Amino acid sequence: MRHNLLLIFTLTFIFSIISCSKDNDNDNQGSIVIEEPEEDVFVEADPDLNAGMITFEETGPSFKTENWQPEDRTQPGNWSYFGGVGDINLSVAYADNPSKGDTNNSARVIHVSEPVGVQSWAGFYFMLKDKINFPSGKDAISFQFYSPGPGHNVLLKLEDELTNETEGKKTTGDLFAVTQGTGWETVVFNVPEKSGERSGIYNTVTMILGYGKTNESATSYYVDNFDFSTPKEVVIAAAPTDSPSSPTYSAGEVMSIFSDSYTSIDGINFNPNWGQSTAVSTETIANNTVMKYGNLNYQGTEVPNINLSNKTKLHLDYFTGDATTLKFFLISPDGNGDGAAEEKAFELDLTNLGTWNSVNIDLSHFSDVVDLNNVFQFKVEGNGSVYFDNIFFYGGGSGSGDDNSAQFTGVFGGATVVDNVFNFPSAGTESWAGFANENAAIYPLAFPHGGKITFTGLTAGTDVDIKFKFEFKPHPDTEPSYTTSNVTVSGTEAKEYTVDIPSQGADKTFSSLLLYLITQDNSVTLTNIVVREYAAPSGTNNSAAYTGTFGGATSVNNVYTFPTGTEAWAGFANENAGIYPLSFSKGGKIKFNGSTAGVDVSINFKFEFKPHPDTEPSFSTSNITISGTESTEYSVDIPIQDAANTFSSALMYLVTQDAGVTLTDFVITSYE
């Protein structure tokens, strides 16, 4: 039976071949053509959004390691990531569509994998072939995002090719979208104009797909189909529903005009009749009193004549949903006899409508017009409805400066924080585990005059040592950096602690702030963490005249020289005896203008108790080098000296011999 079946099958196969041969006789083919399946060819190249939607189906950026670009962009590359900690970084690659369907039928999408331990602002960027030119009516960028659920924050930022912090760097700023559901959805980002321009600026696409989210487990995100879009309708809140952040300055540092946090000065008229159409009222929002200007055209405030000469800044919190122009004026009485008061405006930024804005205005902005010793009115000009809060003056005096509220909610290396309770477990954590400030608005920080960190702390019963670290930028571009001394938090009752920050020089800035617990397995509650950048101290200025030469040094028409063959101790003495005695119990500085004949010249200054021989106590400044043939202002710090020490001899020495240096306008400042 088996043989018969085989015979039948063989005959059937032969007849099939004959039949096919007859069918093909008319075509004279004589052979069977088998088509090869098409290969999936993908070309790695910088995409061109101007040419159409970027689908990543046939071409797209290379996310390979060899095409990765370092943060300083000093090496070729077309993409990079950021927000990693140590060796823990996100990864970017192409992957299959996790949910192919009607909303997104693409086969290939971008897959971003975020491990536990990266910062909550971890993200990546890729570069485009050409700078973006927005079509008429399509002033927004859209892409499809595979949402993990509603309420998820996605950040997009368009940038030019320059490195961050580079002069002239242009970006859109951070643009946000909030997801509506789960799965594929299109998110739209309205792109604002910058100086009246939108096109021809940006060629880099930066994304943070889990903005503000700290991963408790490995997380995957998917994006696809970048395109131009008509702008989305933005619903801007007309009135606040919350209050601005509470001020952190002590009452003794503040002259308050309007704030629930401070007692305001007496005698203020918030609604004088100046013929305005503005309706002035106060409202309680989130248990906080704010002042509302409705139907604003202009609005005055009259105060008893106040002296602001000992203050340095004006603080304002303001909210508007519809104003298109907004200015704040300080006004002093007529000072030039023309019968008109002296006033000057500061234009408030209206970029962020529908949210509270804070601004600290340097009073020097007004001082060229307004007499800060005698301010008697304020004025606001604008339109729409505007809410104000926390109007006060601050700064001036020892220890004054700008406060910055830090939020150490970014955990890394296995450290934990829940409801302000911080812990550094010994099990399963890295030695470098810690906490990152996630209030990016405080950056960059600078401490040319030093600063301090204050916070409230308590423990569960066991002392906990902590410290803070300032870095130039997040890892890996961390240097220069500075780490504070350790501070021990003790007791179960909340107490305020202070950590001093010494001067870090005028050239250093910090855009990464970290908190470390040194003590393991013991929790500590930390709140109200505020970083203060000290302002330049006020002080007494003394004009020095280094016209007294000794030891063979020469000075002719402000050109100073230390010739070879003179005494080793040759130099120059101040002959303006009216500045003595000097004291530097809070330090000081020397400022002057200097230029050379082409050769750099190093100099230093020395202060003595009295002229030789009764010179002690004495001290010398560090050397400072004068460079270039153009007159430039120089400054050298005077370190803090014992309060009991006074100095009635001020000397200057040239370290470099046989090279003339022109020095003028010496001012010695003793900080108060």
Image (cartoon, grey):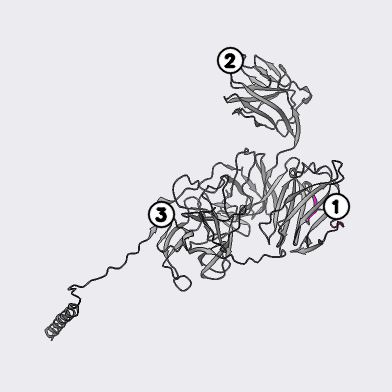
Mark 2 highlights which residue? 564
Going from N to C along the chain, the mark reached first, 1 or 3, is 3
69 falls in the magenta region:
no
Instruction: Locate the N terminus and report the quarter of the image it occupies.
Output: bottom left
Quadrant in which residue 318 is drawn = bottom right
**Residue at 68% across / 29% down in the picture?**
592
Q: Secondary structure at mark 2?
A: loop
Above/below status of 27 relative to 448 = below
In this view, the residue in front, 66 or 353, is: 353
The Cα–Cα distance between marks 1 and 3, rounded to whole angstroms, is 65 Å
Structural distance between the alpha carbons of marks 2 and 1: 67 Å
In the image: residue 408, left or right of residue 146: right
Residue type, mark 2 in image: Thr
Local crowd at mark 1 within 10 Å, few (<14), some, or many (≥20)?
Answer: some
Circle 3 sits in a helix, a strand or a loop, which is it? loop
Q: Identify the amino acid type marked 1.
A: Glu
Asked which secondary structure carries label 1, the reply is: strand
Which residue type does callout 3 highlight? Answer: Lys
Residue 605 placed where, x, y %? 66, 25
The region drawn magenta spans 255-276
> On the rendered structure, is 647 left or right of 97?
right
* Residue 524 is at least partly visible in this image: yes
Q: Alpha carbon of mark 3 to alpha carbon of mark 2: how far?
A: 62 Å
CB atoms at circles 3 and 2 under 8 Å apart? no
> Dot 1 corresponds to which residue?
302
Q: Nearer the viewer, residue 121 or 490?
A: 121
User: Which sits in the foreground, 328 or 99?
Assistant: 328
Rendering coords of residue 288 (x, y %): 76, 61
